[in-house]
Amino acid sequence: MFNRLKNRKEKVDQSRVSISLPYKNEIPKGMYEKCPACNELMDVDILRRSKWVCPECDYHFRMHIAQRVHLIFDSFKVFNHIVKSKDPLDFPGYKEKLESLSASSGVYDAVVLAEASLKGHDVIAVIMDPNFLMGSMGTVVGEKITRAFERATLQKKPVLLFSASGGARMQEGIMSLMHMAKTSGAVGKHSQAGNLFINILTDPTTGGVTASFAMLADIIIAEPKALIGFAGTRVIEQTMREPLPEGFQRSKFLLEKGFIDKIVHRSELKATLTQLLELHEVK
């Protein structure tokens, strides 16, 4: 469905690489997608026009990075794009898996950074992709997110971050876990400098990502019914030895408990983010 990123093998300045993301609505006619929630079979073109939200049950589909870019931003200039994992543990089959995912998705790891604009507001955009090893945070993801906050601090820009992750990446062990502290430190310096950080929690945002930078934002928004938490429900139930409340770790439950600030439907997300930037006088 997605075309490869252009000019990926050109020798360029990696800190200023500018690409046109691949998703151009070139979907062959006759393609169908089944909704994971209601099992409704629908034309992909209809789904695209509905912003990847099921017209029948309002289920918010997980999105490729390029789809989210076209949904939210008016301009998007990628930086630090060509960063690859060195496989610090020499984990069996890991390099081959990364190469395969990179070839099929058009990105080198589970996050893309950009100097972006939204209705005249300049921001640093950080978008995680659950389609790339479930958006898990390894050394590349942690390093890139750290660089995004460092750049935003230097440029005195707000950060808009779309989190989607299964947590820390087991194939990189402690090297992955240490980035929980590293990213949190970068967020702290960005905040101390008086800059804005808005995080949009998408489905799923779990594990070490939730336990680090994802919940440190000034404003935390979630998409409807997004799974948000640290440990999985099965692990918690086995530990507590009692059933969990209905809807536990879903965005509505977290809103009721005060963990997030607002649930925003995907169709209203761009307008909401624009309003928040205007209210904080970020021009």
Image (spheres, rainbow, N blue to C red):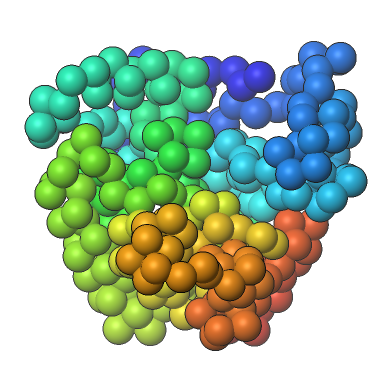
- Residue 19 relative to residue 15: left or right: right
Q: Is residue 21 visible?
A: yes
In the image, 68: left or right of 8?
right
Q: Quadrant of residue 67?
A: top right
Query: Residue 137 in the image: x percent, y percent?
Result: 31, 47
Residue drawn 55% across and 58% down? 227
**Which residue is depicted at the point 52% across and 52% down?**
204
- Measured from the top left, where is residue 211 in percent x and y? 33, 67
Quadrant position of the C terminus in the picture: bottom right
Residue 15 to residue 214: above or below:
above
Residue at position x 57%, y 52% from top?
203
Name the spot of residue 258 as percent of width and height, x first.
54, 85
Residue 225 drawn above or below residue 50: below
Snapshot quadrant of residue 181: bottom left
Q: Farthest front residue?
A: 241
| Residue 260, above or below 11 | below
Question: Residue 146: horizontal and vertical position, in percent?
Answer: 28, 57
Decide which of 106, 165 is in the foreground and name it.
165
Q: Is residue 148 left or right of residue 126?
A: left
Q: Quadrant of the N terminus?
A: top right
- Label tally: 0
Task: Please name the residue shown 48% across and 24% down the image.
Answer: 106
Left/right placement of residue 257 relative to residue 213 reads: right
Is there any visible trace of residue 70 in the rendered image?
no
